[in-house]
Amino acid sequence: MDQVKLSNSTVKEGSRTVHMDQHFFTGYRRTVVRPAEVLVSVELPFSRPFQVVRAFKTSRRREDDISVVTATFNVTFEPETSRVHDLKMAFGGMGPTTVLALSTSNALQGRLWGEELLQTACSSLAAEMTLDPSAPGGMSLKQQGLKVEPVPPECLSATEVFHPPAPSSAQLYQVHSCGRPLRSKVRGRVGRPLVHVSAQQQPQEKLFTATTSNLTKTNLPEPDPQLPSPRQTTVSKAPLRPTYCPSTALRLAPCRRSFVFFWLKTSQDNWTGPIVYDETVFAQREVTCVGHVIGAVVAETQADAQRAAKSVKIEYEDLPAVITIEDAIKAQSFYQPIRTIQNGDLEAGFQQSHHILEGSGLTVVSGSRSFSESGRVLAPGCDYYSNVGNSMDLSLSVMERRSVSHGKLIFDSKHSRSRHLCRTNLPSNTAFRGFGGPQGMLVCEDWIQNIALKLGRSAEEIRELNLFSEGDRTPYNQVLEGLTLRRCWTQCLDRVKIHERRDQIQEFNRYQSPAHIPLAPPISL
């Protein structure tokens, strides 16, 4: 395979040619080019028939200002076949200089380009390309995994055009036939698009580029009057039954466009919500939380609207309030129905267990968990309580996700769980990011830590014992086949050396554990 050639020259030694091969880089930022040499020319070989060159890079970086891994493949096939005639593989980021995978390249020459070649290339690269954990960038494990990604090139999207051309179009509203407008109005509408009515109503300044009209400050159309809408909200505790009179607000906002909006008994549009329509735009009969919108004033100016909104007089009738989960349990204030998931006989599971842990933490979970002498969870029983607020919002979905976040600890054992959505007089919160998953994992980790403490074993052992296994079923009734979870778990433990680090920490703390002890020196005589 042809190589790039550099022609260098010096006054004393004359000209010489340097080949850019595996010997070109001698160290970090050092090459075989001598300090006194001047580059005269660069000779690039022409590409040959059946030759394919592709370059790739992974741009994610943490501590370096360069790409994590770069790769270039130069493959030449035998004419009219898929057999590799010559192959060169170069990687950046796998050492202080660009590295050629010579062993892998030589091993793949003469092979057919296919799945078998890919497997051989991955195995060979894993053995040939190694990286010290202290390498710059802080992601040596990621770099070692990325070095085999670019094989084969045609299987990756990077071989295609990175950015497709932007689409363009044109829409004509005055179509002419034979160079003349269609005279007939009926015939002229057929086969032609019509301008939307709202397009004709746009302000002239929006059509400046299309109509090329000369607009100045004096002939610009006046903007439409703004309609600010200050809301009248509840500022005291809830629930309350309000009584209000909007007539004062109408008198204080005597403008051309003044409206006062309150709930109307005949309105069907007052109810809203993301899934369950149990929220009101304006309070209906009762306000159920602080900040519940009672009404709105719309006026021409913001000052008029605010002045009118403040003038509305509201009298409240105090009603019993439910604020906490304890209040909801006492008042039995739950969204119905109370959903329960049960698998097997929970009481029988308790009788067969060696240990039973009981606890109550309303902010997390309450119930009983039984486990064997080995640490395997046999029969977890849980009661979940969630402070939903004054509307359902996405709380039901959050609770369902929380309930299935325990994996095998729930669905491969005898269990019983009840989920209570507590209706309280707090503003309802929506779901965010974790969507109930972190709460479910927190409950599960509480079990693991208590079991490990009870048995005097490490939490990692208890977690590994209760992992999914081949043939287990997920909460969605999917049978797990080809499961690599335990292999991944073992590799992670080996790579971080968690057991060795824990032993070192315990040994260090035996002699050098910090202490914070107060002293009171006596009064000397």
Image (cartoon, rainbow, N blue to C red):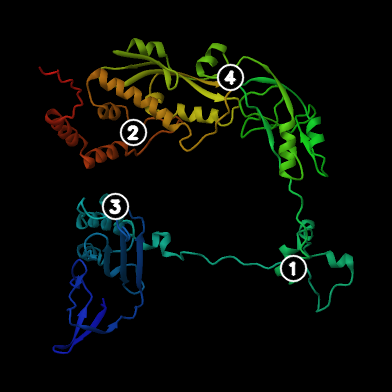
Element type where label 1 sits in the image: loop
Q: Of the two numbered discs 2 and 4 on the same chain, state the one appearing first in sequence.
A: 4
Q: Of the two numbered discs 1 and 3 on the same chain, state the one appearing first in sequence.
A: 3
Q: CA distance from mark 3 to mark 2?
A: 26 Å
Q: Quadrant of the C terminus?
A: top left
Asked whether, in this view, residue 325 is left or right of residue 503, the answer is: right
Q: CA distance from mark 3 to mark 4?
A: 49 Å
Q: CA distance from mark 4 to mark 1?
A: 65 Å
- Res. 61 image quadrant: bottom left
Give the residue displayed 26% in from the left and 68% down from the top.
88
Q: Quadrant of the N terminus?
A: bottom left
Residue 353 in view: no
Asked if labels 4 and 2 touch by Cβ distance under 8 angstroms, the answer is no
Dot in front, 1 or 3: 1
Mark linked to residue 337: 4
> Which residue is nearer to you in this view: 434 or 81?
434
Element type where label 2 sits in the image: loop
The residue to which callout 1 is attached is 216
The residue to which callout 3 is attached is 145
Residue 161 in view: yes
- The kind of residue on which mark 3 rests is Gly
